[in-house]
Image (cartoon, rainbow, N blue to C red):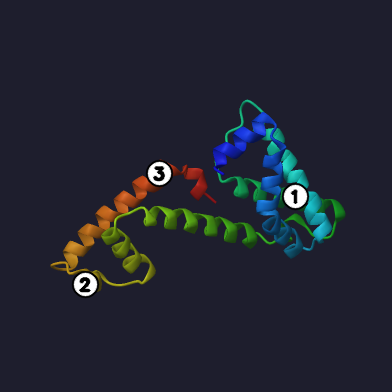
Amino acid sequence: MTESAIIEGIKRGDEKILDFLYKKNYKMMVNLIVKNNGTEEEARDIYQEALIVLWQKANTTDFVLTSKISTYLYSVCMNLWRKELDRKGRLSYDSVEKGEIMDFDKQERIRIVNKCIDELGETCKKILMYYYFDNLSMTDIAEKLGFANADTAKTRKYKCKQELDKKIKAQYTASDFLD
């Protein structure tokens, strides 16, 4: 089910969408709360509140989703949990692990980039993987792929990177990549 189909379903009042979202993201949201001094019961309550927030926001005329739904729900859960912790006085706002959000955002960005890399041609895919993931030099890449020299590999890498950038920008908004 696509993100836009989910939002449209929410706007239509389709409660099956709510059930779908609940099941799809439940484990991730519970882990977030439990890792930050919460119980599973508290996590369920916070997650249900986050789904209500999404449901209400999606039904406003000015609602624009600028991230993945799971990212949105994660942020809402984190904010609701911080408020709950402040209310309970168990932790101060600053002591909630901010690394959890950053790790999730990093994973989401990696997933987006990998999806777009998979859409590239085989040669571009190999060049970018060799360079960015295997840390091979341009000379090594030229050898592996049978290019005339390192300069040829460098030029091809530049063109492949431009193509990847276009794919990412065409499919995702800048806010998907902002911290």
What type is the residue that disc 3 sits on?
Lys
What type is the residue that disc 2 sits on?
Thr
Residue 152 percent coordinates (x, y): 17, 62
Q: Is residue 153 above or below residue 60?
A: below
Q: Secondary structure at mark 2?
A: helix
**Front position in the image: 26 or 54:** 26
Q: Are marks 1 and 3 in contact (CB under 8 Å)?
A: no
Q: Residue furthest right?
A: 88
Assess disc 1: are there few (<14), some (14-19) or many (≥20) residues with their C-alpha within 10 Å of its C-alpha: many
Assess disc 3: are there few (<14), some (14-19) or many (≥20) residues with their C-alpha within 10 Å of its C-alpha: few
Residue at the image point whose x is 80% and y is 60% from the top: 40
Assess disc 2: are there few (<14), some (14-19) or many (≥20) residues with their C-alpha within 10 Å of its C-alpha: some
Q: Of marks 2 and 1, which one's residue comes earlier in the chain?
A: 1
Q: What residue sits right under mark 3 in the picture?
A: 169
Q: What residue sits right under mark 2 in the picture?
A: 139
**Front position in the image: 130 or 19:** 19
Using residue 171 as the reference point, say whether residue 175 is left or right of it.
right
Residue at the image point whose x is 22% and y is 62% from the top: 154
Where's the N terminus, which quadrant?
top right
Mark on residue 47?
1
Residue 141 percent coordinates (x, y): 25, 70
**Front position in the image: 24 or 97:** 24
Q: Secondary structure at mark 1?
A: helix
Q: Secondary structure at mark 3?
A: helix
